[in-house]
Image: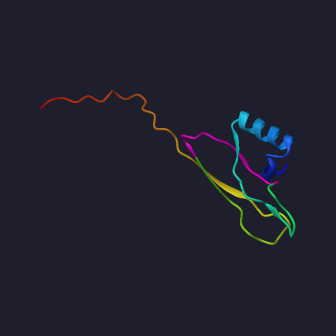
Amino acid sequence: MDLLNIESHKHTVELLNNMFASSLIPTINKPTRITHSTATLIDNIYVKFNYFHTKVKSAIPMTDISDHLPAFCFISYNKPYIRTNQKPLTFEKK
């Protein structure tokens, strides 16, 4: 499904809505197959996204090794800081 046609293709909209409902977000937003007469976004990487602890960066390198461009993404997770088995902080007057 070509994600560049979400406004004109009912099934593409349904696919995207189903992905969003499952917290899956597409990481690629530019065409991945480019010809002399068309450009389509038919190759993607979907990630389960947690806005507070996940950073995603994606890229599409320009190359002529195939009729599709390669797509990749870097995902970094920041674990939340959780205090365990520690006494609460207290401030004493001296």
Residue shown at the point (87%, 67%) measured from the top left: 37
Q: Is residue 77 left or right of residue 2?
A: left
Residue beneath the point at 77% across and 71% down: 63
Q: x, y (%) of residue 92?
A: 18, 29
Find residue 28 and report its horizontal and vertical position in percent.
71, 54
Residue 64 x %, y % = 81, 72
In the image as oriented, which residue stretches furthest toward the front?
Answer: 8
Residue 83 or 26: which is nearer the viewer?
A: 26
- The foreground one among 49 and 89 is 49
Left or right placement of residue 44 versus residue 35 in this view:
left
Q: Residue at x 74, y 50 (%)?
A: 45
The stretch in magenta equals 42-54
In the rendered image, which quarter is residue 13 located in?
A: top right
- Does residue 9 appear to the left or right of 27 in the view shown? right
Q: Please name whichever residue, 12 or 47, is drawn nearer the observer in this view of the structure.
A: 12
On-image quarter of the C terminus: top left
Judged by its main secondary structure, the magenta piece is: loop
Residue 89 position in % (x across, y down): 30, 30
Q: Is residue 53 magenta?
A: yes
Asked if residue 34 is among those painted magenta in the image, a careful observer would answer: no
Q: Which image quadrant is residue 12 in?
A: top right
| Residue at 81% over, 50% down | 5
